[in-house]
Image (cartoon, rainbow, N blue to C red):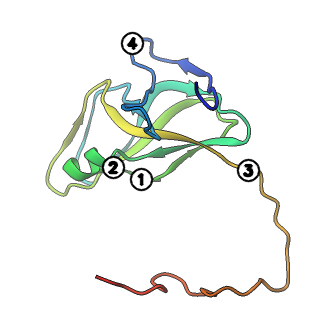
Amino acid sequence: MPDITVPVKRLDESLDLPEYAYVGDAGLDLRSAENAVLKPFERRAVPCGIALAIPPGYAGFVLPRSGLAAKHGISIVNAPGLIDSNYRGEIKVILINLDPDHLFEITRGDRIAQLVILKTPSVGLSEVADLDDTVRGQGGFGSSGFSS
């Protein structure tokens, strides 16, 4: 039994709905609604043929597929892509081909990304003059060092 139910509208009746590849997976597979070719370093918003009604208090996060990244250099420009709960348009994935030498062909129905639905609390900000101290403090990028 699912933890939440997200209404989905098929915009393309011939495509499979997003689904988990294996029991226990966190991401639902999103499929391409079109054929496309990405040249090296080209990006493209690829439609997925669905629209969602994500419940308030949740958001969708669109993540790259690790196999496409490892084997073909395919990623998502704005990873993770964010789908707010009030968005009702078609889900699209902004893919990029990071392979410097090879085209990447997308065939309609290919699994191109993963969708993870997460709880997202509404956050209020409270302005203060000072923040509490922590061990890390203001240590930024690389502050924990490098180990091999």
Crowding near the residue tagged with mark 1, few <14, some 14–19, many ≥20 C-alpha atoms within 10 Å: some
At horizontal 64% and vertical 30% (from top left) the residue drawn is 4
Residue where numbered disc 3 is placed: 121
Which of the two marks, 4 or 1, is nearer to us in this view?
Answer: 4
- Gap between marks 2 and 1, in whole Å? 6 Å
Query: Residue 63 location, x and y as percent?
Result: 44, 47
Q: Residues within 10 Å of mark 3 (few under 14, many from 20)?
A: few
Q: Are marks 3 and 4 in contact (CB under 8 Å)?
A: no
The residue labelled by disc 4 is 14
* Disc assigned to residue 96: 2
Q: Earlier in the sequence, mark 3 or mark 4?
A: 4
Give the CA distance from mark 2 to mark 4: 25 Å
Q: Quadrant of the N terminus?
A: top right
Query: Circles 2 and 1: CB distance less than 8 Å?
Result: yes
What amino acid does circle 3 point to? Pro
* Disc 1 from disc 3: Cα separation: 25 Å
User: Alpha-carbon neighbours of circle 2 within 10 Å: few (<14), some, or many (≥20)?
Assistant: many
In the picture shown, does residue 11 fall above or below 62?
above
